[in-house]
Amino acid sequence: MFIVQLLLALALLGGSDSSNDATSTQLEVNPLQPHPAYSELVLESGLKPFRSELTYKGLEPDYNQFEQAAKILQDKLLESALPPLLSKSGDTGTFDYGGQLKLLKTVPLKQSIEFGPLTIHMMDAQLLEASDIPDDTRKNISILNQEDIGPKITYIKIIYSVENTTDQNIGFYGLNSIHPNTGKPISADRNFMRKPYVYHQYDGVVMDNMGYGLVYTDDPDKLESIELVFNRIYDYDTGETIVEPTSLNIPFTVQK
């Protein structure tokens, strides 16, 4: 079931593939080594505009602008066909929210990392360029990005799954931020691929698939690595911290 769910999520989060003749060497990534995140890398979260899954689902709430934008984009994603993923640098396709898509860089991770009671299954990290973005999509991405975008953007896409391997009731807000080597950090609050609610409770043996689309405004040619910072893992019932914020370094260049 895990494989089926994850493959479905990967297909939904990808773009329609139209591979060109560009060739590229598959980047081999050494085993990822999690380590405690420096406190200055943990950004203050602004998730308050989003309700939790428990208070959102089934209640038909009056959506605020953030929830409305997330729902519209999620509906566009779910309505699109299940295309193959872009897999090589230079591949082109259709942006699932409207417009064209080009894969600039990709890191096929396919690694599982234990974070205390949770296992995070890292799948892919990609740098993509979306162009000819229609006005309605631009409006909704701009709301979630908390900054206006044009008809063409570069963005970082991260795909992973979270699995609780215990019978504990665990709280975890997932990715906190991305810190590119180019210097400008990106808060995960700006995720335009987010759900219209916040899922942060893992009660018993459960799993959830996560996708992040974060607009990247620096020079894409200079992107060599990103550091992912994850929020703390805590006891959902007591609020007690189990695992402090953790970071992973992901290279976009060949490792020596």
Image: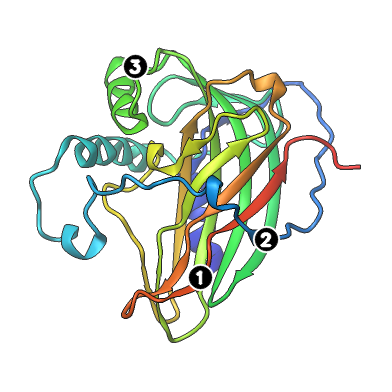
What is the secondary structure assignment of the residue under circle 1?
strand
Residue ID at (28%, 39%): 70
The answer to whether residue 245 is visible is: yes
Q: Are marks 2 and 1 in contact (CB under 8 Å)?
A: no
- What residue type is disc 2 on? Pro
Above or below — where is 117 with respect to 154? below
| Foreground of the two, 161 or 170 | 170
Residue ID at (27%, 21%): 136
User: Dot 1 corresponds to which residue?
Assistant: 163
The answer to whether residue 85 is visible is: no
User: Dot 3 corresponds to which residue?
Assistant: 134
Q: Position of residue 46 (x, y in %)?
A: 32, 44
- What residue type is disc 1 on? Glu
Q: Are marks 1 and 3 in contact (CB under 8 Å)?
A: no
Q: Nearer the viewer, mark 1 or mark 3?
A: 1
| Foreground of the two, 91 or 50 | 50
CA gap between label 2 and label 1 equals 17 Å
| Foreground of the two, 35 or 55 | 35
Above or below — where is 243 with respect to 147? below
Q: Position of residue 137 (x, y in %)?
A: 32, 24
CA gap between label 3 and label 2 equals 39 Å
What is the secondary structure assignment of the residue under circle 3?
loop
Q: Which mark is residue 34?
A: 2
Q: How is the image coloured?
A: rainbow
- What residue type is disc 3 on? Pro
| Nearer-N-terminus badge (1/3) | 3
CA gap between label 1 and label 3 equals 36 Å
Q: Position of residue 239 (x, y in %)?
A: 35, 74
| Nearer-N-terminus badge (2/1) | 2
Q: Position of residue 64 (x, y in %)?
A: 15, 40
